[in-house]
Image (cartoon, grey):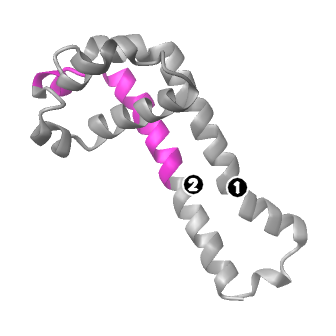
Amino acid sequence: MSNIDTWSPWVAIAFLGGPMLLAAWTLAYSLYLTHRHLDAIKEALKNSRYIYIWGPSLGKRGLIWSLLEMSKITGMIMWPKASLILGELDPVDLKNFPPYLKRRLTVNLKIMIIAFIWMLIGVALLKLR
């Protein structure tokens, strides 16, 4: 395996900058979901305790809170076991969650995971030099 120092500078910049670009894309997509689909998500999860408690203020507390709320909702839908045990998520709401919204949340999560794995590979290559 070749050392990253032997790579072309532009290839190294593109490879190591890729995760940051994907992270920015994920942030932008999360904001898109918050501004365009949050009402549909709240309607789909109307029986869930998390939405019942935080529903009126979701999406209205600023940029950072909107991103955190969308990541929380994404985690509740993609990995529902903990949310079901805690009682934050209603099992009927999870079963009836619209597929088009689930696909959008899945895309958001997959982009985050790809960026994280790519970043770990970049860090490992830098540590090997």
Observer-nearest residue: 122 or 82?
A: 82
User: Mark 1 belongs to which amino acid?
Assistant: Gly
Q: Main secondary structure of the magenta part?
A: helix
Can you say which quadrant of the picture contains the N terminus? bottom right
Residue 83, percent across and down?
A: 19, 39
Observer-nearest residue: 10 or 23?
A: 23
Q: Residue at x 82, y 83 (%)?
A: 5
Tell me the quarter of the picture where residue 58 sits: top left
Which of disc 2 and disc 1 is earlier in sequence?
Answer: 1
At label 2, counting other C-alpha atoms closer than 10 Å, the crowd grade (few under 14, some 14-19, many 20 or more) is many
What span is colored magenta in the figure? 92-113
Q: Is residue 28 above or below residue 98?
A: below
Residue 87, percent across and down?
A: 12, 33
Dot 2 corresponds to which residue?
A: 115
Marks 1 and 2 sit apart, C-alpha to C-alpha, by: 8 Å
Q: Is residue 106 above or below residue 96?
A: below
Q: Is residue 45 visible?
A: no
Dot 1 corresponds to which residue?
A: 18
Tell me the quarter of the picture where residue 28 sits: top right
Residue 96, percent across and down?
A: 19, 20
Q: Is residue 84 left or right of residue 65?
A: left
Identify the disc placed on residue 117: none
Asked if the residue under mark 2 is in contact with the one under mark 1, i.e. CB atoms within 8 Å, the reply is yes
Q: Residue furthest right?
A: 9
